[in-house]
Amino acid sequence: MQQTAQLLAALTDALQSGQVRVVDLTQPLSPETPVINLPPIFGQSPPLTIECICQYDDTGPAWYWNTLHLGEHTGTHFDAPAHWITGRELANNTTDALPVERFIGPACVIDASREAAADPDFLVTRAYIQAWEAQHGAIPAGAWLLLRTDWSKRTGSDFLNDSHTPGFDADALRYLAHERDVKGVGVETVGTDAGQAGGFDPPFPAHNIMHGAGKYGLASLANLDQLPPQGAVVVAAPLKIVQGSGSPVRVFALVGA
């Protein structure tokens, strides 16, 4: 117990002194936040709307607050296993039931920004991941696997890009879920799957494979260019929505200065 207290005190001191930096990996959330477009036969996630309840006026002279209306998977968000049909039968698969210790883990950041700039449909493969591991070390069990593409630097239609966005192929996701036992995958695009993933086998493998294995997803991340390939710790805690399939989330990383 004393040793644990000393470790926590050392972390607090390192944060206060700047030896450990906190990097915000979250996109701003506003009515202008891009929302994924699905074919019209499917239900659509609405854009964020904000309605002022009161702001230091007659309806609330000393306080300010708003009403929010948005889908669970808006902006930087967390995907729970229950989000996909393959994860619907798993125990503790919704945001209110997930163990909180599972939200924190080491980060492995694969930089595919150059490839994504050259080819918006670029896919990370098992071989690509293994080449990264040969250079940076094996991906530890329980890690967040984050894919840097610099997509977060795009805006509007260039961000959504008519469904042409980078991601992972199915074999890479099987490798991460079953052979590396990652906590989940995180991306800078609007969703964890590549834009063309509806035509993959299986369709939408980042959702199908990862959530079926009880893994999580993080989408619309930012500032991954400020993280090292290994060595950071990521915290991604969704709202405790009862029976929630996911939620907007504030994601941050602890990084050595």
Image: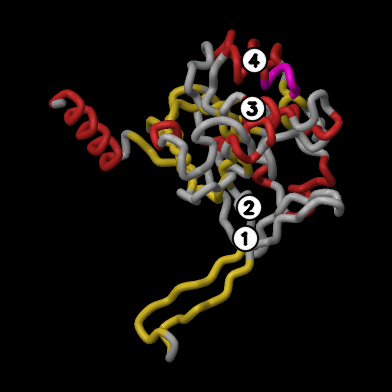
- What residue appears at the point 77 percent right and 54 percent down from the top-left corner? 43
Residue linked to disc 2: 74
Q: Which mark is residue 70?
A: 1
Spatial CA distance of label 4 from label 3 is 14 Å
Label 3 Cα neighbours within 10 Å, binned few <14 / some 14-19 / many ≥20? many
The image shows residue 132, relative to residue 164, as above or below, that is above
Is 181 positioned to the left or the right of 199 in the image? Answer: left
**Circle 4 residue:** 175
Amino acid type of the residue that numbered disc 4 sits on in the rendered structure? Tyr
Do we see residue 212 in this rendering? yes
Most common secondary structure along the magenta stretch: helix
Q: Earlier in the sequence, mark 4 or mark 3?
A: 4
Q: Residue at x 44, y 38 (%)?
A: 235
Tell me the amino acid under the disc marked 2: Thr
* 229 with respect to 56 (left or right): right
- In what element is the residue under mark 4? helix
Q: Secondary structure at mark 2?
A: loop
Residue type beneath disc 3: Gly
- Indicate yes or no whether the magenta region holds residue 7: no
Query: Helix, strand, or loop for circle 1?
Result: loop
| Residue 222 seen from this side | no
The magenta stretch is: 169-173
Residue 30 percent coordinates (x, y): 60, 62
Q: Residue type at mark 1: give it.
A: Leu
Does residue 47 appear to the left or right of 60 in the view shown?
A: right
